[in-house]
Image (cartoon, grey):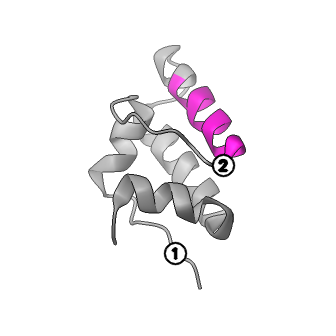
Amino acid sequence: MFTVPVIERPEWRKLVRREISHNFQNYVLQMIVDQTVQQVKDAKLTELQAISDLHNLCNKYALAVQNDLKSIFKDW
């Protein structure tokens, strides 16, 4: 079974703040992260809601995003 790092990890916040530079392998995840970053900048989403939405998406598609998560979070 594939898992996702817990939502409390600081990397989630860094992702939605664009503080982590990562070349995504999963194009859909890249697009969602870009969209989420913009929505936070435009005040359409709070940072916490953005993190929650991104975490939920990664949980739903854990298998498809494993390589990116392993690269960003290293281990969990």
Q: Amino acid at mark 2?
A: Asn
Q: Does dot 1 land on a helix, a strand or a loop?
A: loop
Look at mark 1 in the image and give the residue it sits on. 3
Residue 37 coordinates in the image, percent (x, y): 51, 27
Q: Residue furthest bottom?
A: 1
Question: Which of the pair 8/69 is nearer the observer?
Answer: 69
Please tell me whether residue 68 belongs to the stretch shown in magenta: no
Q: Amino acid at mark 1?
A: Thr
Q: Residue furthest top?
A: 42
Q: Does dot 2 land on a helix, a strand or a loop?
A: loop
Residue 13 coordinates in the image, percent (x, y): 35, 41
Q: Tell me which secondary structure the magenta stretch mostly adopts.
A: helix
Q: Residue at x 45, y 39 (%)?
A: 22
Q: Number of marks in the image?
A: 2
**Which segment did they paint magenta?**
26-37
For marks 2 and 1, give the one nearer the viewer: 2
Q: Residue at x 41, y 66 (%)?
A: 5
Quadrant for the N terminus in the image:
bottom right
Q: Residue furthest right?
A: 28
Look at mark 2 in the image and give the residue it sits on. 26
Question: Which of the pair 39/11 is nearer the observer?
Answer: 11
Q: Residue furthest left?
A: 10
